[in-house]
Image (cartoon, coloured by chain):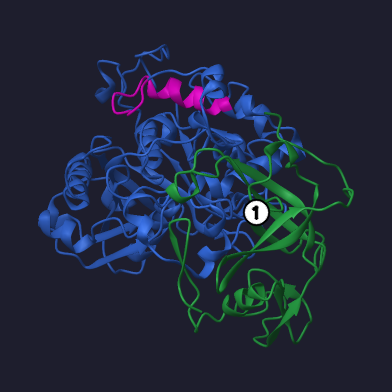
Amino acid sequence: MGRLTDKYCIVGVGETAYTKDSGRTTRSMAVEAVRHAMRDAGLQASQVNGMLSYHGGDSCVSPEVASDLGIRLDFYMDCSGGGSSTEALVGLATGAIEVGMCETVAIFRSMNGYSEVRIGGTGRRAATPVGGSQLLSRPFGMVSAGQSFAPVFMRHMMEYGTTSAQVAAVKVAHSKHASNNPKAYYKKRYTIEDVLNSRWICKPLHLLDCCVETDNATAIIVTAAERARDLRQRPIYIMGVVGRVTKARGDTFYNDAPITAVAGKYAAPRVFGMAGVTPADIHLTGSYDAFTFTTMLQLEDYGFCKKGEGGAYVSSGIIELGGKRPNNTNGGHLCEGYTHGMNMVIENTRQLRGQADDYCPQWQEGIHTYDYSEGKCRQVRDAEISMNLGWANPVTGSALIMRR
Amino acid sequence: MPFVQYRGMQLVVPENESEFLGYFEAAKQHRLVLKKCTACGLMRYPPGAGCPWCQSLEWSWHDVSGKGTIYSYEIIVHSIQPGFRDIAPFPVVIVELDEQRGVPTPQEGIRLIANLVDDQFHPEAEANVAIGKRVQVVFHDIAEDFTLPQFKLSNEPPQGPVWQFPS
């Protein structure tokens, strides 16, 4: 087990509504999300003195957010990055506290990901000159995340016989979960046929293989276990964390073959070793679903099934509520909203508390029906250990194992 | 090398672009070149600043045949970039060059991104795109002083299995 296993906790979580037109600044949203997380934890402004965030040139900075909430900072850093940042920053927060730079760290991600700066390089990003490493792909029309990752899935289909219908089951599962999540942007339940009949974006990806783009902010608060015990919520303990693990020659996703293997191949032994558990011990996962197939690729390389058997795994019912190991019980990026991974850490925190905010009348007291039919419960029964699998791209990933 | 406008993008390869300048200067002469390490002799792509195999900073440009095999691909149907809408659907391919295949490790290869195009530089028809097909570099002069290396299908028979997305 790691030297710091169980010594740090997530004590507060919060977010704004998921919309496609927030009509306000990323600063305004970040302030609301961090405030919600502080209220959730029962923390005063004077008790938060660290802040971390990540951005892609599309957000506000910690001193703005802290000032709006009356927080004086002893430590902050606003890092460049998208997916896989949340888990990495949880690890950095524990390190900052461990060396004594601060005591309690709020981590936020705030983005007008639909109305202002979209991922694919349209909108504000379109006018940016194309140079350096971008010359490898952008002149050929390969710009967006889907366009960049699709050849990885194509090769997986060729090597292992994976099918579109198999990964469509990821959308089916996550949409089932979202239908029991009042916060989810898309609450409709989808079928395999819905996914396969949706229009092509870049083959082999259909529209419904791709996640939603939203405006929102999310926040989580990390502190040491001895402080966490005095706060409002049941502490959720950090058992193991790894951040921004890359494959060899991680500047492209097609050099370190097979390209069907993702960063989890290298992250898995490190994070499971630190946490002192194996995939069999994990009750629920949060495998990043920028696309249906990204969830599958990570579950394979973290060892939840054998390499190449991800298609069978994700279409077996295991990843659905009521299955053996549900994935993205909030509906994930495919349905709840897109926040570069933080919403899945928030979800797993709430699940481990027994406080999934579903349609059960007494969810706040941790009383659930475990009826997973539409518009009902989404709490996983007896959830004790969760794992988040953060994805930046096929060659970069992070992971976080937590327990109640 | 000045800026060039191409499909709504401004491609920039400034004089201090120590990674890509020589690559595009050679392309202008219709040559495909890779950085070759002076110390260990291995080539690399992308044209990075150091040798990933021996960390030497000494290198020279080396001409390669431009022959290769499609390692993977996609068909972009919905082009989010307005400049590509008039050619969608169009294929993007990852080409594995013949040179240095399986060297220095069995999984290594020199792999490039390109569009698969026909003799007029129009997108190759989807029905003709498949993993395993043999390809050859072609040079598309997109401006007076800027050339984009692309790939087209070659007449060579495939060297291994051929696989196409069943759509």
Q: On the picture, is A273 further left or further right than A109?
A: right
Name the residue at 22% across, 50% down. Answer: A26
Answer above or below: position of A63 versus A340: below
Shade representing chain B: green
Q: Secondary structure at mark 1?
A: loop
User: Does residue A58 appear in the picture of this structure?
Assistant: yes
Answer above or below: position of A331 versus B48: above
Judge whether residue B85 is colored magenta.
Answer: no
User: Does residue A325 appear in the picture of this structure?
Assistant: no
Residue A209, position as x, y percentages in the image = 52, 32
Q: Quadrant of the C terminus of chain A?
A: top left
Judge whether residue A174 is colored magenta.
Answer: yes
B66 or A34: nearer the eye?
B66
Residue A271, position as x, y percentages in the image = 55, 52
Residue type at tag 1: Phe
Q: Which chain is blue?
A: A
Dot 1: chain letter: B
Specify the quadrant of the image occupied by residue A150: top right
Specify the quadrant of the image occupied by residue B99: bottom right
B41 or A241: nearer the eye?
B41
B44 or A6: nearer the eye?
B44
Name the residue at 27% across, 43% down. Answer: A115
Q: On the picture, is A48 further left or further right than A202?
A: left
| Residue under label 1 | B121
Specify the quadrant of the image occupied by residue A85: bottom left
Name the residue at 53% across, 49% down. Answer: A275
Answer above or below: position of A37 versus A68: above
Residue A292, position as x, y percentages in the image = 54, 34
Answer above or below: position of A218 versus A379: below
Magenta stretch, residue numbers = A168-187
